[in-house]
Amino acid sequence: MEKQLLNHRKVAVVGCGFVGAASAFSLMQSGLFSEMVLLDADRNKAEGEALDIAHGIPFARQMKIYAGGYDDIMDAAIIIVTAGANQKPEETRLDLVHKNVGIFKSIIPQIAERNYQGILLIVSNPVDILTYAALKLSGFPENRVIGSGTVLDTARLKYKLGEHLSVDSRSVHAFIVGEHGDSEIAVWSSANVSGIPLDNFCEMRGHFDHEASTRRIAEDVKNSAYEIIAKKRATYYGIAMSVKRICEAIVRDEKSILPVSNMMHGEYGIDQVVLSMPAIIGKDGIETQVPISMNEAEQEKLKASADTLKKVIGELTL
């Protein structure tokens, strides 16, 4: 099949559940795109969401939003995949793996066989495993298959630190890396507030028990999704904003540094596993990884996180 020219003002969302619909709504408000196609196994659901979101266009910017099929999205600059089973209360993201890999086997080949040339943004959980599956099932170059990774976890960390220190969370610079899930790592050793090392800034704000505070905040971040799911059965607004942020970096070729899911090739002694590490994101997707400084304990935890994911990858048939 011949290559289709991409329309850089067009986006597609595959999967119109809570996350897909919230992401579409967030993107409609962003003004980044002039055309958006929604796909779902239930065509009525896609059509309903497209209509509902489109009715807000008079309050936003002019664009075309409609439900479609795979042939309608081959010229989209970005295809966002949110399709999959939801995480239930008491269920970890890794528990979802076999259900959602099965769903990906029915989605990704349909995109690949049409010789799609744009960027795949994987959002479904467990996102690191499913980004790996999407890479293998599509055969696309690694720069063009991105997982939303720990972009949301990192935002949660910045939010919690901003609250703790009574400071604008946008002035907080810190990353969550590794699995988007239970083995994620908060990189405290390089965390800072506008260039001031975190511990120094904490003391300036009257906080001196660094170990207890960092442990509590990291746990709160890790358990955020569980807490929200227990209270309202799903999380979707935070991830929708994360999706919009990643799309913004791609469409505007911002060269932003975001902790997305990407393939490791020997960095920190980790190979052939997809996990979240900061990378420069621009119009071609992942430009390059950014080697942030981590202390020895953090590097060990990162290797343990990679081993957790590798074990799951070993059980997959792709």
Image: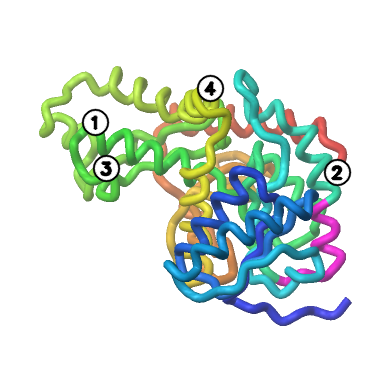
Residue tagged 2: 318
Helix, strand or loop at mark 4:
helix
Which residue type carries mark 1? Answer: His
Asked which secondary structure carries label 1, the reply is helix
Mark 4: amino acid: Ala
**Earlier residue among tags 4 and 1:** 1
Proximity of marks 2 and 4: CB atoms separated by less than 8 Å: no
The verdict on residue 173 being magenta is no
Residue drawn 80% across and 62% down?
A: 111
Q: Point out the stretch of residues depicted in magenta.
A: 107-117
Q: Is residue 175 above or below residue 58?
A: above
Mark 3 surroundings: few (<14), some (14-19) or many (≥20) residues within 10 A: some
Where residue 229 sits: x, y (%)?
54, 27
Q: Earlier in the sequence, mark 3 or mark 1?
A: 1
Q: CA distance from mark 3 to mark 1?
A: 14 Å
* Residue 273 horizontal/vertical position (percent): 67, 42
Report if residue 301 is visible in the image: no
Tell us which disc is closer to us: 4 or 3.
Answer: 4
Residue 192 badge: 3
Q: Mark 3, mark 1: which one is toward the viewer? A: 1
Question: Mark 2 is on which residue type?
Answer: Leu
Q: Which mark is residue 164?
A: 1
